[in-house]
Image: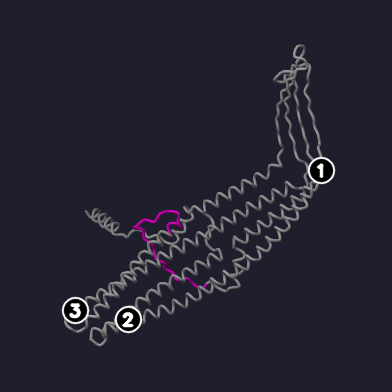
Amino acid sequence: MRVLLILWLALLTLSHNPAHALTISEAVNDALQYNPRIHQFLELENAAGARADQARAPFWPRIDASYSYWRGDRDPDLDSRKLSQAETSAGYNLFNGGSDWFRLHEAKHRASAANYQRRSIVADIVLETKQAYIEVLRTKRTVDTEKTSVELLEQQLHDTQLRLDQGLVARNDLLRVKVELATARQILSVAAGRHEISRQALGLALGRPIGKDEKFADLSLEPTSPGAEQELHQEMFVNRSELKFLNSLLAAELAGRKAVRGDLLPDVDLVLSYDRFGNNALPETSDTDYDSESRAMVQASWTLFSGFDTRYELIGRGHEIRARQKEVKATEDRLTLQLQTALEAFRVSEENLSTATTAVIQAEENYRVNENRYQANVATTVDLLDAQEFLTRARNEKVKAQYDLHLSAAAIERVLERGPTLP
């Protein structure tokens, strides 16, 4: 009996557990798993890897087989002739100025660039998911604040109606409370709509729909100071995939230019071939009129003039390399500005949160004082409405400051690329 009682209590406890609330870490993991843009760039990375494997082809021998059949009539009444030939050949490039070697390295660098590009996209998706998640929490808190404002005004409307019935206030006081209540309800409706839109935006970042009853866990820990800017600056340059992406492309273009320069040198190939001839549709070994032929050759070719094709290709690639170098420098400057902006936003958010926290305490005290004065018929309806408006505004500003701090911390993590970069 005692065992049954214990089981019943355990089931009762489980049945009253609240539904699981999605955390921000779980949201990030869902985005890494389901977001289609991540899979898009993963496929592009795989394609670049396949191109690198394709660039290994020149290091393998090339094997070809061919067949030809010819029939001719020297005199239709006297003679006709049939010829057939089957050939198998294998060729291997011994030297081509190093073009194949440098093209292989160019393909490898482009595959590496695709990897860094995918990592950058993953980091962007992580930031986008965090921002969408924080926006859901912010809009939910705003809805709660506006609901509290509506409830206070509804209570004030009830009290004002009683005072009007007792002849303690004028009718215009009641009308003013009704107008304020109608405005607060409109603001609440707008806040609820924004909350629903933020949920849809989060679902888009996650790559999966958000259920109507899905809950979201609030952020428990306040962000800490990120540290000295100089140290963060060095960390950013080491971690950022955008710089690694551009440097990989630069290395690929340098290797590609060396590959083009190899076209100025001769090509040397080793060719092995075996031919079989016959006077029927299929060459036969028993054919006495024709014989087979085996050849081993070393072929060398050198393009002496190609209309300055290689020369202008080298000039064009030189300009592209210098342009890429300028892009790397511009990206470094842009990332430095990103870090400075994110750190300044974090500092401002910390100050705003401190100020907003103090403002809420003062607004709550102001509302309490005015409510007591109103109950004692010392303060007017306008005084109480103003105090209620100040309190709602202060609470909303504190909510905004709290989540702005989390947003700036998430932006700093993205600038430093500290989050996950693998799906």
Residue at the image position 56 percent from the left and 66 percent from the top: 416
Q: Which residue carries the number 1 mark?
A: 302
Residue at the image position 47 percent from the left and 68 percent from the top: 407
Q: Tell me the amino acid under the disc marked 1.
A: Trp
Q: Indicate which disc, 3 or 2, sits on the residue closer to the N terminus.
A: 3
Question: In the figure, is residue 300 to the left or right of 67?
Answer: right
**Where residue 121 sits: x, y (%)?**
54, 57
Q: Tell me the amino acid under the disc marked 3.
A: Leu
Q: Which residue carries the number 3 mark?
A: 162
State whether residue 245 is above or below residue 372. Answer: above
Q: Tell me the amino acid under the disc marked 2.
A: Asp
Question: In the figure, is residue 265 to the left or right of 150?
Answer: right
Q: What secondary structure is the magenta-colored segment mainly?
A: loop
Q: Indicate which disc, 1 or 2, sits on the residue closer to the N terminus.
A: 1
Marks 3 and 1 sit apart, C-alpha to C-alpha, by 105 Å
Residue 148 occupies quadrant? bottom left
**Where residue 365 sits: x, y (%)?**
33, 82
| Residue toward you, 203 or 82 | 82
Q: Which residue carries the number 2 mark?
A: 386
For the record, the magenta segment spans: 202-225
In terms of secondary structure, where does tag 2 sit? helix
State whether residue 352 is above or below residue 3. Answer: below
Residue 76 occupies quadrant? top right
Marks 3 and 2 sit apart, C-alpha to C-alpha, by 20 Å
Q: Residues within 10 Å of mark 1 (few under 14, many from 20)?
A: few
Marks 1 and 2 sit apart, C-alpha to C-alpha, by 90 Å
